[in-house]
Each structure stands twice: as C-alpha cells, then as structure tokens.
Amino acid sequence: MSLDSLTDLVSNAVGVLILLLLVTAIQAQKPFNEPPLPIEHQSGLVPAFFYVHGDHIQSIDINAVFTNGLLAATEGDSAAEFQINADFTGRSDELLTLALRPIDTDNWPTFNELQNVDTPLGSVVRDIDAATTFAFLFVHDTGSAESFRLLSQARRWFLDQGIAVGWLPVSDNNPAWLCSWSDVAACQYSPGAYGRGTRG
Amino acid sequence: MIDSRARHELKLELFPFISLFLCVIGVLAFLQNLMVMGEIGSTEEAEAEQAQIFQTPYRVDVYPGNILLSPPASDLSERLPDLALDERAGLDAIERGRNTILTIGGFNLDLTVEDNQGVLGVLFNEIVTVNRLAESRGYPYEEYVLLVVHPGSTDTYHMLRAMMEQAEFRYLRVGLDIGDGTRPQ
C-alpha cells in the first residue's frame, strides 16, 4: 500500500471521528430536562428576593429595605411601619427582622416584564449570577390561584435559565420577613428545587 | 544517469507526514474530549440517581385549616431488606398503617384540633424511624416531607412548619410544591 492511500484512509477515519465528536458535544449541551425535586436544601448561594402578588411580581431591593429600616429605627418609633419604597412598607419585628407588606401591587410588573431584559425587573434578573445567587420568591396567598399560577410560571422560567429557586407562601397574617441571622431557621432562605448545577 | 534516478526516488514528500501528524493529534484530542465528557455525564447521572430514585416523598397536601397525608407506596421491605427481627416488626407495622391510609385515599387531619397535632407527630415519627433505620444499615433510602401548598392554605402551612420545628422533626428534609387547589375525589 502506498503512503498516499494510507494517508487517505487515516484522514477519512479521523473525519468520521470528528463528526462523532461534534454530535456528542451537541448532545452534551442539551439542558438537564429531568424534573427537579422540590426539596429545600442548604447551599452557598445568596438569595435575590422577589414578591409575587396576584398577576404581578416585583423584585425587593435589599439595600433600600435595610437602609430605610435603619433610618426608621434611629429616627423614631422602631415598631412603627415605615415606607421602604413605592412598592413596600416595612416594620421592625423581633430578632431584628423586617416584616414586609406590599403596596400598590396593581402597578407592579407582570411575568412578561420579568422575561424582558429591557425592563427594570428584567434587568434585575439579567444581573443574577446563577453561580452565586438564587431567586427566592415570597408568594402572597390571597386565597385565589393567581399568585400560585404566576409562581409556577416564574419557577419554571428561572430553572430554565439555570437559576435555582426557593419560595415561601405569605399572607396578611404571616407576612414576608427579611432577616440575616444564619442560626435562626426562619432566616435560612433556601433553594427549594434542584436546578442544574445548583446543588449546595 | 542511474545516480540521478536513485536521488529522485529517495526524495521525501512533506505532505503525508504532516497529514499523519495532524491525524494523530486529532485522535488524541478526540479521546481526551470523550474522557472529559464521560466524567461530566457520570457525575450528572449520579446526582440524578441520588435525587430521583432514593429520596421518596411523604406527600402532605396543605388546605385551608386541614392537611391530607399520603404516605409513599409501600416498598419498604424491598428498600430495607436485611433488618433485625424487632426492626422488621416495627417496619411491618408502619407499612400496614400506611397501606391502610393509602386504601382510604389519604389521611385527613384538621390541624386546629389539638389532639390531631399529636397524631401528626406519630406519623412524622414513622418517617424519622424509617430514615434512621435506612441510615444505620447503610441503605440508600430517605423519605422527605413534601408539602403541597394549595391556594388559601398559607396560614395552615405556617402552623405546620412551626410544629415541624420540634427537635425530633427538625432534621427531616422538607420539599415545597405548588398545589392547584383541587382535592382528590
């Protein structure tokens, strides 16, 4: 056999192997489609908070919450309700916890704006680094299924983006709270589903 | 004349050697990629296996004021086959109780009745017992409480979570899922 024939043979074989490699690589890039188990679990991820109320969803600016909370505590009655921003009021609770109440929710963004990076809410989501942060949703239970429907959509969507999700149902009697005591169970915000690459 | 032909036949071409060299590099790169991808695949499969096969939900549907308990379908004797006699007897009793609950379509509990909170404690203790047995015998099996929260049941949910903060239940894994408000027929 001449050297040219041998070269031809080997080149063809390598060509086929490269094609196989491409197919395998494309398959490996497919998202992990198995339905995640909704188990709460510890992780090193930091929560990015959102609040779902009916058909509306809003992000919670933690800096504004604690800055205004601190100002309210130093200026006057620490137990009184204070305005955090246009979307929430807050009240200091025991264990240095802030209880949040939503206001004016009819003007809040909807699920479509969550998906759109050109909106303020969408840009908050765009800035989430899935390697360090997960989405935690407070879901206001009004008794109807609206909030739960939106939660279901948002949870699926966050998981599709590779972002882990945790959530907590809240109500008028059991409002959303924010605190940072790592040894208090109520302050441990956890992802509640195994998203791809997000296990702690 | 002969010398000139001999020199011509000995002339080496560069192309076949470069081609072979590139082929070898290509094959080595392919093998390396294959090994790396195999490693990633096996990690994902192992995680999926651990997450989906061995962790079994004890479903608790949370409705306004009451809960509906649905234990996992009974296969404890298969999951934990080799036990001491007294352990087996305890597990069999748990299985019989669970089968009864499954036969009647779940166990409905009004959480506002104080005695029922004790009943719930007994049922959750069964999960703790099963998990402890599995762990002590090295069986890869764990039950967790899957709370399915239906619209309007948030206050009941918080009451239930407060009860689960008791020391003996604190280490039970808890899952949280979204209910659509429907009740089983």
Image: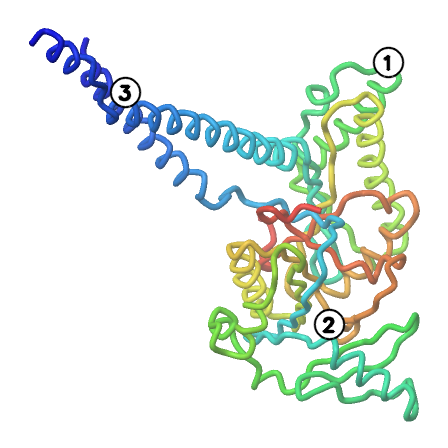
Instruction: Tell me the residue that label 2 is attached to.
Output: A171
Q: Residue B91's quadrant in the figure?
A: top right
**The N terminus of chain B sits in image quarter:** top left
Q: CA distance from mark 1 to mark 3?
A: 65 Å
Query: Mark 3 to mark 2: distance in Å?
Result: 69 Å
Q: Nearer the viewer, mark 3 or mark 2?
A: 3
- Locate residue B77, reporting x and y percent: 72, 20
Q: Quickly name the residue at label 3.
A: A10
**Residue drawn at point x = 72 percent, y = 50 percent:** A40
Do dots 1 and 3 share one subunit? no
The x and y percentages for residue B108 are 73, 48
What's the residue at 57%, 47% (across, down)? A196
Question: What is the x, y in percent for residue B44?
Answer: 57, 36
Q: Secondary structure at mark 2?
A: loop
As helix, strand or loop, the secondary structure at mark 3 comes to helix
> Residue sitting at 86 percent across and 47 percent down?
B170
Q: Which residue type carries mark 2?
A: Ser
Neighbor class of circle 1 (other Cα within 10 Å; few <14, some 14-19, many 20+) is few
Residue with the mark numbered 1? B85
